[in-house]
Amino acid sequence: MSSASQQSWSDSARAFLDPRVMAMLFLGFSAGIPLLLIFSSLSLWLREAGVERAAVTFFSWAALGYSFKFVWAPLVDTLPLPVLTKMFGRRRGWMLLAQCSIIAAIAGMAFIDPAKGESSLTLMALAAVLLGFSSATQDIVIDAYRIESADSLLQAIMSSTYIAGYRIGMLVAGAGALFLASAFGSTQDAYNYEAWQWSYCIMALAMLIGVGTTLVIPEPQTHRPPSTAHSTKDYVGFLLMFVAAVTGFILTFYYTANLAEDFTNRLTEVFSSKHFVAFLVETLRLATGVLVAWLISTVMIRMGMVNRHMMEHTYVAPVKDFFERYGVKSALWLLALIGVYRISDIVLGVIANVFYQDMGFTKIEIASVVKTFGLLMTIAGGFLGGILSVRYGVIRILFLGALLSAATNLLFMVLASMGHNLEMLYLVISIDNLSAGLASAAFVAFLSSLTNIQFTAMQYAIFSSLMTLFPKVLGGYSGTMVDSIGYSNFFIITALMGLPVLLLVWRANGYLEIDNSASNSQKEL
């Protein structure tokens, strides 16, 4: 960080013209497209189709692939793809595969009408899960590509450019999808499936920007071992283990649905809160699925179907490296901080569009203020966060970002009491998005500094997965929470969720020397 601060303003400006930096703008755009097609845009589509609010927010769990991407990050790091790896390289081959899968998932969602009943909703959920899985895979590869393609001095600028592209992609998938759906004739009072179908088809075509970028960028040069370090049998065994474990998890989760419902009804008779009981039961289902996946993997390893050394290098070594570099106590504080840093933003964000709609704002107003104007404020906040991080240090800006993210949630409570007030919406979005951009820029720089380039995809995937896991699980119940306690109390609770984050940042600052240790580890490589 200190080295970056010694650069002149002209040197910093010229760095934005570096082809690697420009590539991150377009790759960021490609990464930003899928997210809102699972969250806000899909939630408005489902609401217009007559799907209940609680069911709408449950669809946010389709994006849990982002939170579990560390599970298959070793596949991306280790497994060569037939034809694609030879033609494009390790990173670009996986990037192209992920982008093609994203296009297929978005197109699949476009040809499903959620208003046709439970079977259509099930198909929509499956397509959304595929989109979340494919998008998370793309994120794994892009994060690894960004860290491996430039030294630490260029990472801050590449991160800022990536965030800008990401937000533009979110604008296209958010405001763009809403504008298109409205222009094609779908409203809250007059649902039109074809309007949303065309909107999602156009979003699938927008992903071609990412595909084109992948085809022209160079493969990064790294010190990683070549893909021939293991035999074909090892790779096949590794892939089969992953498929078997995932299949076991899905089947366990599917076949325990009726049992979970029965268990929830029985426990509700004992406990007064049905929603709390449902949360505990669903958490138990999730844990059971994870246990089954772990048992399948363990059995296959002990039977010799998977190369044990390969497993240790891909799964154990990255985790061991992290704890060795920072020490157990400091590493645990770091992981706790990563796990809850964005909890206030994510939990509120799941239901934000539904809130705007319930307050009487039209899709055009939401697209204009929340998406378009909000994007400008987020990008401004991102560049501000990058500058302040260089000037005052990442930890201080992390603290400021956490404080502002929690405090700005209280503004939503004021908006809830005022109802449809466009001026107040502008004020809330201005302050909230500026704070979110500032916090995000500092947080990306923070996570990048923790990553050892020898284990790029795995370590960064662990950090970014942990960042969203608990907030997204909790966010899936945001609709149920609002139904129970109302919007105002919900916003107060999301603000209070940010208070422990301040303590964790403060404690982390007392135990860690992140900038020095991270830069030293990269210099050694």
Image: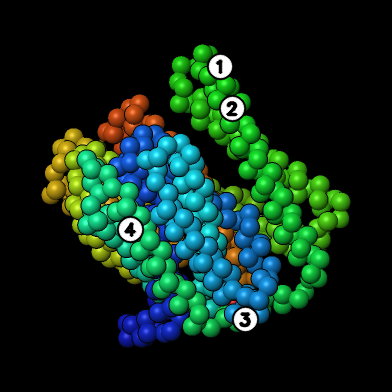
Q: Specify few, some or many for label 4: CA neighbours under 10 Å numbering under 14, 14-19, or 20 or more.
A: many
C-alpha distance separating marks 1 and 3: 57 Å
- Do residues under tags 3 and 4 come within 8 Å of each other at their CB atoms? no
Q: Tell which circle, 2 or 3, labels the residue nearer the N-terminal end.
A: 3
Q: Which residue is mark 4?
A: 199
Q: Tell which circle, 2 or 4, labels the residue nearer the N-terminal end.
A: 4
Q: Tell which circle, 1 or 4, labels the residue nearer the N-terminal end.
A: 4
* SS label for mark 1: helix
C-alpha distance separating marks 1 and 2: 13 Å
Q: Specify few, some or many for label 1: CA neighbours under 10 Å numbering under 14, 14-19, or 20 or more.
A: few
- Do residues under tags 1 and 2 come within 8 Å of each other at their CB atoms? no
Q: Tell which circle, 3 or 4, labels the residue nearer the N-terminal end.
A: 3
C-alpha distance separating marks 2 and 4: 36 Å
Q: Residue at x 59, y 69 (%)?
A: 94
Q: Nearer the viewer, residue 127 or 53?
A: 127
C-alpha distance separating marks 1 and 4: 44 Å
Q: Which residue is mark 2?
A: 258
* SS label for mark 3: helix
Residue 87: which numbered mark, if any?
3
Q: Which residue is mark 1?
A: 266
Report whether 241 appears left or right of 479: right
Q: Specify few, some or many for label 3: CA neighbours under 10 Å numbering under 14, 14-19, or 20 or more.
A: few
Q: Nearer the viewer, residue 301 or 524?
A: 301
Give residue 364's position: percent from left, percent from top.
20, 53
Residue 387 versus residue 153 in the image, above or below: above
Q: Residue at x 54, y 29 (%)?
A: 280
